[in-house]
């Protein structure tokens, strides 16, 4: 496997290739974990609504309607830029 180092390509050592594969799979696992976390936090709202009651009052919803839940996380990693407020001090 070749990578560019400046203007010249160089061949990666076997240990460097192995490290890149480890990093790739670790990043994929992290992305899956973030997706599960986003889905779980989103499902908390309808679940809380369906089970919420006031003391001595019957639940407002007595049946479970169908729910469609979607969760998304960015596929490409990036860094967010911090913007300076307009007209503010620099």
Image (tube, rainbow, N blue to C red):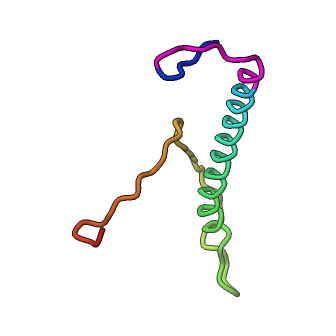
Does 15 appear in magenta?
A: yes
61, above or below 72, in the image: below
Q: Is residue 43 left or right of residue 19?
A: left
The residue shown at (77%, 22%) is 15
Q: Position of residue 43 (x, y in %)?
A: 63, 56
- Tell how many labels: 0
Magenta residues span 7-18
Q: Quadrant of the C terminus?
A: bottom left
Q: Is residue 13 left or right of residue 1?
A: right
Q: Is residue 57 left or right of residue 88?
A: right
Outermost residue on the left side: it is: 87
The residue shown at (61%, 52%) is 38
Q: Nearer the viewer, residue 41 or 30?
A: 30
Q: Quadrant of residue 24?
A: top right
Q: Position of residue 33 (x, y in %)?
A: 69, 45
Q: Quadrant of the N terminus?
A: top right
The residue shown at (60%, 13%) is 2
Q: Position of residue 87 (x, y in %)?
A: 22, 69
Q: Quadrant of residue 72?
A: top right
Does 9 appear in magenta?
A: yes
The residue shown at (60%, 54%) is 65
Q: Quadrant of residue 89?
A: bottom left
């Amino acid at each position: 496997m070749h990578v560019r180092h400046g203007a010249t390509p160089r061949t990666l050592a076997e240990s460097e290739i192995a490290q890149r594969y480890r990093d790739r799979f670790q990043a994929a696992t992290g992305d899956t974990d973030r997706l599960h976390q986003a889905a779980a936090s989103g499902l908390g709202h309808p679940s809380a609504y369906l089970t919420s009651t006031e003391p001595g009052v019957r639940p407002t919803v007595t049946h479970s309607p169908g729910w469609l839940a979607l969760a998304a996380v960015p596929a490409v990693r990036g860094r967010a830029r911090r913007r300076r407020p307009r007209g503010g001090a620099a």
